[in-house]
Amino acid sequence: MRVAAIDCFRGLSIVLMVFFTMLLALSSNIPDFITHNLPNSIHIGDFVLPMFLFASGMSIVFFREKHIKKGRLEYVLDIIERAGKLAIIWLFLSPFSAAGFMGFDELILGIILFLAVIIIAEFPEKAIVLGVAVPIIFYLILHYMGGLPDFSAHYIGGYASTIFYLPIMLAGFIAAKTQNRGPVILGSLAVGLILSFFIPPYKLIASPSFMMLAVFFSLLIFELIERFKIRNSHLEYLGKKPLRYWILMYVVIIIPVLYYAYYSGIGLPLGFAWEEAVVINIGLIGFLYLLSKVVDRIPIISKVM
């Protein structure tokens, strides 16, 4: 079972992830309103990865419903197959996406959270809600005891940040299971604002205030898409194939650019003005879309991706 609003929302999130990722490789003078991943600050681009994690949490509801009907054994095998395929792709991409083999990046974050939510989903709904609260409480305890890890030493916080991203994917899972999302929207906003008085809502320190505001932002965007029946066939298409789009970005653009920057001595970013970088980026996003359509016509590749 596919839900068009979720596909559209996830398609939007993967397009934005690709846009912001490639933008950092093209320009060094990006204005505040389209930059992200800067220390001690919060930007609109910081919410793009959480959007995708939230959408992934929503999709898990339908993944379970679709696969669990086959029987428990096949369901477990499907989980292993999906996680295994993602892990193989991560091993290949990690030297480029995380600056080191088996380094921490968006893909391994998604894999770990997918497995965690799949396990937690077996528990009653109250326990799932508790699963949102536990990482927040754990963060606050570590914060006031001075025991938080140094998130800044690693890309997007490193492996230690994974547990603190868990509330976002769990919130997506909860949102997909309920029709009345008003309390989730208001609750995440209220908790996020309250926590902001104690810990700044910064992505690079994996703060619970940021995570709760990210839940609010993600759910608000999804509600707008669903309530106003915003549909875009291109976004829905990409929402069904986000992993392929991400792989194509690295294989066709990011990896060649990294090698070019290294061997030419130019380094990254490439030095385009931000306006030029935005135009180039939009063109590349369209090119990747068309390339994905070409892959559809090659059965041996499309089955893997």
Image (spheres, grey):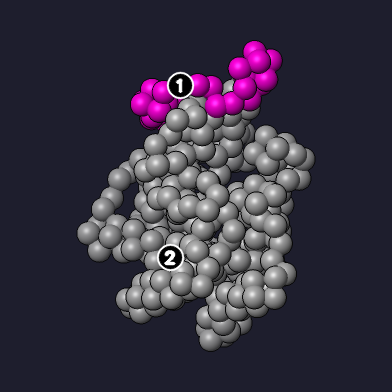
Left or right: residue 164 versus residue 150 is left
What distance separates the C-alpha of mark 1 from that of mark 2? 32 Å
Question: Which residue range is magenta in the image?
Answer: 258-286
Using the rendered view, name the quadrant where residue 30 is placed. top left
Which residue is under mark 2? 213
Q: Is residue 7 above or below residue 59?
A: above
Measured as percent of width and height from the top left, residue 47 is found at 45, 54
Measured as percent of width and height from the top left, residue 142 is found at 68, 73
* Quarter of the rendering occupied by the C terminus: top right
Q: Is residue 63 above or below residue 132?
A: above
Going by the numbered disc 2, the residue's amino acid type is Leu
Measuring 46% from the left and 69% from the top, which residue is drawn there?
A: 196
275 falls in the magenta region: yes
Say few, some or many: other residues with alpha carbon within 10 Å of mark 1 (under 14 / 14 to 19 / 20 or more): some
Q: Earlier in the sequence, mark 1 or mark 2?
A: 2
Q: What is the number of the mark on residue 170?
A: none
Main secondary structure found in the magenta portion: helix
Which residue is under mark 1? 272
Q: Is residue 183 above or below residue 53?
A: below
Measured as percent of width and height from the top left, residue 284 is found at 44, 27
Left or right: residue 35 versus residue 100 is left
Q: Which residue ends up furthest to the top in the rendered image?
A: 264
Q: Is residue 43 above or below residue 168?
A: above
Q: Is residue 190 visible?
A: yes
Q: Which residue ends up furthest to the right in the rendered image?
A: 101
